[in-house]
Image (spheres, helix red, strand yellow):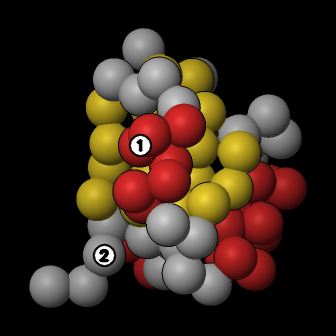
Amino acid sequence: MNTAIIGLGVIGKVHAEVLFDQKENVVALCDTDLSKAQLVKDKYFNNAKIYSSYEEMLSSEKIDVVHICTPH
């Protein structure tokens, strides 16, 4: 399954680490702060694409599961 993460702050990084440990196929990372997404990409998911817009991400990628890790 193709997985994406929206929001790469504190909780998003926790999700990223777990997904990495479980060897999930993370294809996209999304955050309005692209530097946060880049850090997660560099650490865990070299092949993932980075987006600042979740709308663009959803329309551009074939994604089966999305982890939404944005603030309440």
Q: CA distance from mark 1 to mark 2?
A: 16 Å
Residue at 42% across, 14% down: 1
Residue type, numbered disc 2: Thr
Query: Residue most toward the left?
Result: 72
The residue lying furthest to the top in this view is: 1
Taking the image as shown, residue 36 lies to the left or right of residue 12, namely: right
Q: Position of residue 15 (x, y in %)?
A: 42, 54
What residue do we see at 32% from left, 67% from top?
69
Q: Residues within 10 Å of mark 1 (few under 14, many from 20)?
A: some
Identify the mark at residue 70; answer none if there is no mark: 2
Instruction: Tell me if I can see residue 68 in this picture.
Output: yes
Q: Which residue is mark 1?
A: 58
Where in the figure is residue 72, as x and y percent of width and height? 15, 85
Q: In the picture, residue 25 is in which quadrant?
A: top right
Element type at mark 1: helix
Which class describes the residues within 10 Å of circle 2: few (<14), some (14-19), or many (20+)? some
Query: Where residue 7 sits: x, y (%)?
Result: 43, 70
Give left or right: position of 53 versus 46: left
